[in-house]
Image (cartoon, helix red, strand yellow):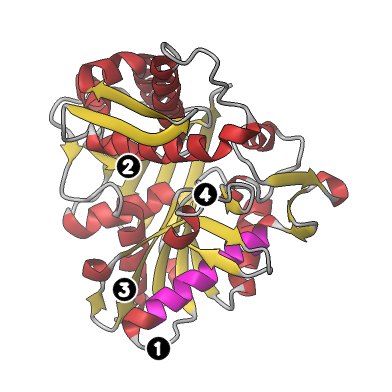
Amino acid sequence: MLSIDLGISNIIVCTVAGNRIGMNDIQYLPSYVMIGEDGSVTCGAAAKDKIAYNPSRVIFGAKRLIGHKYHDRSVQELLENVDFEIQAYEDDNPIIVVDGKKYMPEEIISFLLEHVKETCKNTAGNVIADCVSTVPANFNDAQRNATIAAARMANLNVHKLLSEPTAAAIAYCSFERRNQIHLLVFDFGASKLDVSIVYVDGQVFNVKAIATNSNLGGANIDNIIVDYCIEQFKKNHSDFNPKDPKNRNVMACLLKAAEEAKMVLSSLYVTDFTIPNFYDCEVLDVKLRRNTFHNLIEPILDEIPIQIHSALKAAGLKPHDIDDLLLVGGSSLIPDVKEKIEEIFPEKIHSILQPFEAISRGAATICWLFLNNQIPNFDVIRENIGQIVESP
């Protein structure tokens, strides 16, 4: 059985067989799909690596499209940041177009899930068709149904859809055998920040409140780094236009470098950007120090306590009511982000779980419990979703 954390940037999957949860063999698969000129489909890292050379053919962020209408704000925002074509289709549903061929968002996600199956087949030695998958807690019925439809296209049988904060809480409980506690799940993903308050009581997980900001994610930080690099480069090349289609490939290279730099600065104090032949045969060579990085992302850092207090207020709690805090998502590893959290919750960050793995590990735990007859069926794990507060 597979546990699948279907993320916007990466799919994190592990195989559960018998008495073993294969977290040592965890797979990180970039959520990118490339449609070739011949209609062939390439997924994962191989597709992501092509984005600098064929940006109009590499599709990402399909999860942000499912269950939405073309004119929804989230879809329009995605349009501004991608090079592939998205059109309005029947009933204002968004559809992706490559070489005139139309692809529903669910179809793109099904390509990714087929890639997941094939990758895990190579690891496990056999085809695995059963899974537990996770979805954001604020997914509506249309989005949940679209996720299940994508899995069916990939011939995957979804036994349960778990909300992401519930999955993280289950992973926490597999290490900490505690009941009747309030757990804060701080999920700083690629496209949004979710702060969830989960009350755990046995096998019941009550997501009491979620404060979500869909305009505050790791991608925003990437874009800030890109803008800084362009600003530095234009000091000597003022005629450079990052929006010129002729510069599309080098801008894709810079964005990829920015994603990597964000993580490098989590452990180092300086990183260098060097991209040859960036413009007019000139090299882009920019140094970014952690203190400069801090100043650049300060507006984002200032939003963190706002989201935390919004979730606490919706749950009717104070900071001292939180028993433990769990970090989820790559951007939660940024030292400045952790410092902001610790200003509100000193010494409460739980560090046993890796932020990248927490959600997938929670789904894997449910698979393991079922396969080992610890739970009679997947419905034993009950979750309730309370108040959702969305930032404007």
Crowdedness near tag 2: few (<14), some (14–19) or many (≥20) residues, C-alpha within 10 Å:
some
- For this rendering, which residue is in front, 307 or 293? 293
Q: Residue at x 54, y 66 (%)?
A: 42
In the image, which is nearer the foreground, mark 3 or mark 4?
A: 4
Q: For mark 2, what is the residue?
A: 330
Q: Which mark is residue 51?
A: 4
**Position above or below: 230 against 200:** above
Q: Which mark is residue 385?
A: none
Q: Amino acid at mark 2?
A: Gly
Q: Secondary structure at mark 2?
A: helix
The spot of residue 38 in percent (x, y) is: 68, 69
Main SS, magenta residues: helix
Give the quarter of the figure containing the N terminus. Answer: bottom left
Q: What amino acid type is highlighted by mark number 4? A: Ile
In the image, which is nearer the foreground, mark 2 or mark 4?
4
On screen, residue 151 versus residue 204, left or right, reads right
Mark 3 = which residue?
369
Q: Amino acid at mark 1?
A: Asn
* Range of residues picked out in magenta: 106-121
Q: Kindly identify the amino acid type of the residue bearing the numbered disc 3.
A: Leu
Label 2 close to label 4 by CB (< 8 Å) = no
Residue that appears at 34% across and 19% down? 301
The CA distance from mark 3 to mark 4 is 40 Å
Q: Nearer the viewer, mark 3 or mark 1?
A: 1
Taking depth in this image into account, of 97 and 375 the one nearest to the observer is 97
Question: Is residue 120 within the magenta segment?
Answer: yes
Q: Earlier in the sequence, mark 3 or mark 1?
A: 1
Q: Residues within 10 Å of mark 3 (few under 14, many from 20)?
A: some
Q: For the residue labelled by badge 1, is the local secondary structure a helix, a strand or a loop?
A: loop
Badge 4 crowding class, 10 Å Cα cut-off, few under 14, some 14 to 19, many 20 or more, is many
- Looking at the rendered structure, the secondary structure element under dot 4 is loop
Mark nearer the N terminus (3 vs 4)? 4
